[in-house]
Image (cartoon, rainbow, N blue to C red):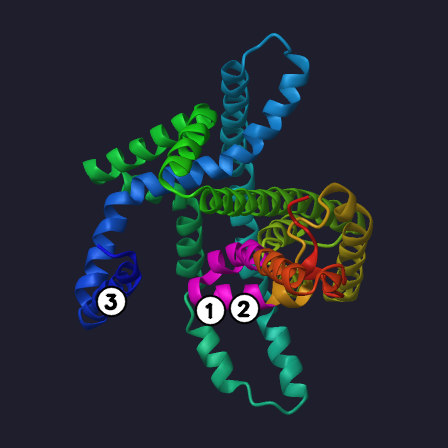
Amino acid sequence: MDKSYKKPLLLITFGVILFAAFNNLNYVANFLKSCIGLLAPILSGLLLAFVLSIPVRGLAKRLRRKLTKATDRQIDMISLLLTLICVIAIIALLCVIAIPQLTASVKSIAALVQEKWPDWVGLLQRYGIDTEKLSAHFAALDWKSILQSISSEMNTVISSVANVAGSTVSAIADVAISLVITFYVLIGWRELSSQSKRALYAYCKESVADRICHISKLAHDTYAKFLSGQCVEVMILGTLIFLSFSVAGIPYAGLTAVLTAAFAFVPYIGGFLSCAFGILFTLLAAPNKALLCFIVYQATQFVENQFIYPHVVGNSVGLSPFWTLLAVLLGGKLFGVLGMIFFIPLMALVSQLLHESIERRLHTRKPELSNVQSNSDENTDISQ
């Protein structure tokens, strides 16, 4: 076939396939759902392997300095075992200590609301607000059943998940396949990386293969830096909030610290939400300490952001506040909480690739403009 006809023929074929797909969206959607269902164990195993690879590789670097005679496979095995031990220990601590304390805190808050309700009604009545309907609605609430429901829900989350996972043989098999894939990927990631590169350079042009390798490395580094940075941020900020609230005598220090750690995965918005919850809890238990709660929380956030976070975590993704907030809003609108979290490094990756493309074009057309520095923070090189 004449090469001059090859490209138009490919475009026509692609257009026909695209037209057929748009005219049969239901079939295409069902086909994609079936494929995702079949690949779900593999995808979940790869995702878990990626998350665990961050501490595994960090431990491997430190172990390699001390265990000079050990092979790479032995170091990978030791670092993987240490990571699994840490993960199991964290889960055990959450089940034994954190969850029961959170349950007790929620029960205490519900009891405080029930106890202080008459005082709040009296305060509203003094300002001339009609509270009869509000009081009737509140009195109709069955607080005993509500507390029992909250307690049972919080205490049986893990067991219910385990029951659902174990309800069918296929679910157990999927979990087993995911864990096996995770284990083998973490153990043999060097071989997998080498084989993937060999196949890529064998079937693609060298320039295309180089570009794919560059984007893959940039994506890995961006997500790894973001996840590791956010995990460190969660531990540091949660611990500081708990200690500062405990020293200041502010109630519900543990619950506020847990909420702060959870919301810390969502930049900017998470800080406001956790602070609002902390003030609300303080207003319920000790209204005279609400202002102190706000001051202590903001002071702790300021110290952590200005003096601890830049040195311990640094600029994990190199994204400006505007683009970070845009990524949070867009990701939350499309995929909920997980979208808020994972769209931040995705936006950083797109920003970095766009910056590289702009620099290449400027260097080709007008080399003197390629050295012009942008004032935007998103142009920071996150690969360094």
Q: Residue at x 45, y 78 (%)?
A: 137
Sequence order check, earlier mark of 3 and 1 = 3
Query: From mark 2 to mark 3, how far is it between C-alphas?
Result: 38 Å
Place of residue 117 in the rendered image (x, y in percent of width and height, measured from the top left): 58, 72
Q: Main secondary structure of the magenta part?
A: helix
Residue 335 on image: x %, y % = 43, 62
Name the kind of residue labelled 3 in the image: Ile
Q: Can residue 199 be seen in this view?
A: yes
Locate the C terminus and report the quarter of the image it occupies.
top right
Q: Which residue occupies the extreme top position in the image?
A: 69
- Between 193 and 237, which is closer to the camera in this rendering? 193
Q: Which residue is drawn at 77% across and 48% down?
A: 310
Q: How crowded is mark 2: few (under 14 residues within 10 Å), some or many (20 or more)?
A: some
Pick the quarter of the image with the N terminus. bottom left
User: What amino acid is found at the position of numbered circle 1 in the picture?
Assistant: Lys
Magenta region includes residue 9: no
Q: Report the residue marked by disc 2.
A: 329
Whole-percent x, y for residue 190 in the image? 48, 26
State the separation of the CA atoms marked 3 and 1. 35 Å
Callout 2 amino acid: Leu
Q: Give the range drawn in magenta.
A: 326-350
